[in-house]
Image (cartoon, rainbow, N blue to C red):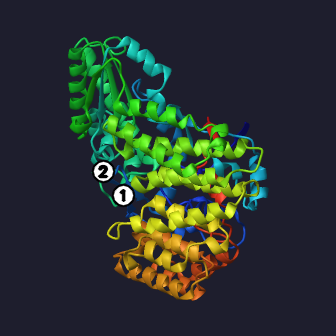
Amino acid sequence: MNKIYVKRNDKYRAILTETTPSETPIIFSNEGLYKLLKISKNNQTKTVSIEDIIDQKPTKPFKYYIKKDDSDFRIISLLHPSSQIKLSKFIYENQDLITYYCNQSDISIRYPYKQTSSFYIKNKNLENIYKLKGENKSSYNIDIYSLYSPSFFSYKKYDRIYKFINSKEFVNLESRFGNLITIDIAKCFHCIYTHSISWATKNKEYIKNNLGVKHFSDKFDIAIREGNYNETHGIPIGPEISRIFAEIILQRIDKNIISSLKRNNITYNKDYVIRRYVDDLYIFSKNKKILNDVKNSVIYELSLYNLHINKNKTKESERPFITSKSMAIQDLYNIINELSVDFIASILNHDRYKIRFIERVKTILKRNNLRYHDINSFIISALSKRLRKYISNNTHKINSKAINMIFEINFYLFSIYSNANIGNVLCGDILHIYENYKRIENINTITLNLYQIIYNLKDLINKDDPIPIEYMNIILMTKIFNKEFRLPPEFIKETLLSKGDKSDYFSIISAVFYLENNDKNLTKEIINIIFQKIKNEEKNANSSEITHLILDMAFCPFIEDSEKRKMLKELEVAEKNIPLIIRLAKKNHYAFVNWRNFSAYNILFKKELAKRILRKFY
């Protein structure tokens, strides 16, 4: 484990981690934008300020759907680059106040407590990753370690809710309190009133007496609101900065709950304890009466901020605190635990074992009255670990049939229920196979099997819905296959571009990236789609989707300069700046997609999809 230090005096660093959703295509990142911002700041020669040419307010976020469960979707927002830059500066300038207001509650178990100054990387030196994987350090004083830092802030206490449920702390709370109720705040981010951040950081008397005075909360309110097209009801879902905004408000509510109950002689940490992970609350109490009093206080204090509980997700229980999902995962762990390196190597009939494994999963689901969305993340991640361990620990030639068996089980589960994180795990598995291809017998049989599995995914895509991010990423990962196993242009057209001019930004950049210059006619169709989207938008410069799209196309080597000029004019870029942007593109710079230097390893590393690499940050 090597400790990596990052520069803390960088006002743009937060744009790498805090301002975009994690559920994006694997080719998308803010790294190119970050480098362009640094070039504008540090370069002495004449260049264009990317910050100035895209400066807009208010801006309209690009909204897209991701799967929430097997029957529902969540709307995610990709903020306009201009809004992201402003938020990045706000974070840098107000980091101490952010951590101050996020350290007010004894209830919260996920909150930023200081700026990250270092993080750990397992096994490899970051400089060597650049050398080995084909990237070069920039000459514009860019700290490469900042590019890989997992977060602008360091967080306490748990980064995943299951870690709390499986913790010693949870066991200790169960030993002290006999009753538990779990509460979910209904549509928390949708219902947050942006002005309420002032209520959370100042009392109402202060607000009345200081009208017109710009305070931290007012600046935060404006920055979030302007990035969400001046909406005051609801904040963008997806970026970490929105969770920070919500956390400040929820910590004030936490304190109000404790104070109101204390006035009724119900004492925190004696009669009850609450643990809150973002918008999920766990209330432990000594008896049902106290439990009910605490629940009512939570409901009341939330209502003062226009927030409400989801009654359908409210569940009471008595010791032992265990759910049907927890019991199912224990059973699943037992059957997955069979798959040791030696056991995998000893399987004679892989098809028979695969069918038997799937039947056992079905039995566990039925017995516990669960659905695939409840357990798929666990099974696929656990099987992924077994697959990688089998490859890493096997000193002999690796059996391709065993690898195909695990892939077929995982893609069977993926076809029934998937989400972006599950797709990321499978992308990492595909990459791991190809990093070790010399040790695998009959690697082409694995590639052919994966090709057929992925090709058949198009039958699962609902033509009326946007293509899921996880499907998009699996398709993009086939770019690392040998050319004879890559997906044909007609497949790309039928999947990524099936919506025509209704195709969204992510679908278009993925299609252009995959095709490169290999199908001139389809490239022309894509350009027509882009111009139709531009025409359909009321004000292009304010639109996050159009701005992202045009900037990516302006730096794309597969698009003619004449088309780039037309697009940049639609973005209201000054005539004098257009040649400067095109010149930057010819020097291999990029905005959000690194068109020329595709490295699946670097992409997965940067997006923390390969969780084995990034372990802990401080």
Q: Earlier in the sequence, mark 2 or mark 1?
A: 1
**Mark 2: few/some/many CA within 10 Å (<14, 14-19, 20+):** some
Local SS, label 2:
loop
Q: Which mark is residue 234?
A: 2
State the image coordinates of residue 281 (x, y, percent, origin top left): 34, 30
State the image coordinates of residue 255 (x, y, percent, origin top left): 34, 25
Q: Quadrant of the C terminus?
A: top right
Residue 61 visible, this orientation: no
Above or below: residue 371 compared with residue 59: above
Please indicate whether residue 575 sits to the left or right of residue 535 in the image: right
State the image coordinates of residue 528 (x, y, percent, origin top left): 45, 85
Contact between marks 2 and 1 (CB within 8 A): the answer is yes
State the image coordinates of residue 137 (x, y, percent, origin top left): 75, 59
Please indicate whether residue 499 sits to the left or right of residue 552 in the image: left
Q: Which mark is residue 228?
A: 1
**Mark 1: few/some/many CA within 10 Å (<14, 14-19, 20+):** many
- Judging depth in this view, the residue of 132 and 277 nearest the camera is 132
- Judging depth in this view, the residue of 616 and 250 nearest the camera is 616
- Judging depth in this view, the residue of 15 and 386 nearest the camera is 386
Above or below: residue 252 compared with residue 570: above
- Could you tell me which residue is drawn at 43 percent across and 81 percent down? 529
